[in-house]
Image: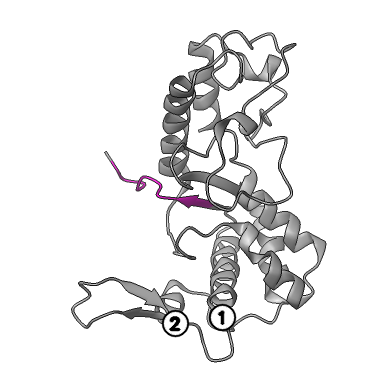
């Protein structure tokens, strides 16, 4: 998938490996991650590239003064679609309009260490340049590689979160329907003594644990195309 995105940039006359200092050219991560994600919508200009010494700045849609909003939007829609289709499989809802920054208060309460915070920051922000889109919080927020995913699963496993089997069925057991027919949508009911934030973070732990068993990484996104979408 990464070579394919490199090829896409090459069609625009942009050589990422040679020129780009705004993306990690091995995994396309954002080099300049803020401390915490934006609460809802991360505007394009703060995410765009600014260093005019880049040899591709006159052609790259990521460069703030050389690109227009529409060319960047088209590029990111393409890359996000590829990432979602190539890299995602099982999915789990963790909260409407949720992002990893919203766990910070809970992490403070539980005394979480720096490794948990760092992994969650990467999960919420690595896709800030190449993955976020231009509507609400849509797009690929970030990802962890297999080793980081295992580390996160173990670190979250040490926190006082709701305890249940690491399976999709166990997570689904917390789902409740507004009416028996299922016509009015659903919600997730946390166990007694826990908030939805506890349950949501426990879902992250569970997905990371399941992925770790398969030696896979995890991806955080919102309103992504389905893997088998046409």
Q: Is residue 145 above or below residue 46?
A: below
Where is residue 118 drawn, in percent x and y?
A: 75, 55
Identified at 60% across, 62% down, the residue is 212
- Within 10 angstroms of label 1, few (less than 14), some, or many (20 or more) residues? some
Where is residue 31 drawn, in percent x and y?
A: 72, 35
Magenta-span inclusion, residue 226? yes
Q: Distance between the residues labelled 2 and 1?
A: 9 Å
Q: In this view, does 194 lie above or below 201?
A: below
- Give the residues in magenta: 220-229
Question: What kind of element bears circle 1?
Answer: loop
Question: What kind of element bears circle 2?
Answer: loop
Residue at mark 1: 195
Magenta-span inclusion, residue 30? no
Where is residue 17 drawn, in percent x and y?
A: 67, 19
Where is residue 120 drawn, in percent x and y?
A: 67, 57
Identified at 60% across, 39% down, the residue is 128
Q: Is residue 106 visible?
A: yes
Which sits earlier in the primary sequence, circle 2 or circle 1? Answer: 2
Q: How is the image coloured?
A: one colour
Quarter of the image where one finds residue 228: top left
Residue at mark 2: 189
């Amino acid at each position: 998938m990464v070579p394919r995105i490199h090829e896409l940039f090459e069609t625009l006359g942009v050589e990422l490996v040679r020129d780009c200092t705004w993306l990690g050219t091995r995994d396309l991560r954002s080099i300049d991650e803020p401390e915490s994600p934006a609460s809802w919508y991360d505007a394009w200009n703060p995410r765009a590239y600014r260093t005019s010494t880049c040899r591709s700045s006159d052609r790259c849609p990521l460069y703030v003064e050389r690109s227009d909003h529409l060319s960047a939007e088209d590029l990111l829609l393409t890359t996000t679609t590829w990432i979602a289709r190539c890299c995602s499989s099982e999915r789990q809802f963790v909260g409407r309009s949720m992002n990893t920054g919203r766990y910070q208060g809970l992490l403070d309460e539980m005394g979480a260490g720096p490794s948990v915070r760092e992994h969650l920051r990467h999960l919420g922000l690595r896709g800030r340049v190449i993955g976020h889109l231009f509507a609400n919080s849509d797009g690929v927020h970030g990802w962890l590689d297999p080793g980081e995913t295992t580390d996160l699963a173990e670190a979250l496993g040490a926190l006082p979160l709701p305890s249940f089997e690491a399976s999709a069925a166990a997570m689904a057991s917390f789902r409740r329907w507004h009416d028996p027919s299922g016509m009015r949508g659903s919600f997730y009911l946390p166990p007694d003594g826990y908030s939805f934030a506890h349950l949501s973070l426990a879902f992250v732990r569970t997905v990371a644990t399941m992925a770790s068993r398969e030696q896979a990484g995890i991806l955080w996104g919102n309103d992504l195309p389905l893997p088998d979408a046409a």
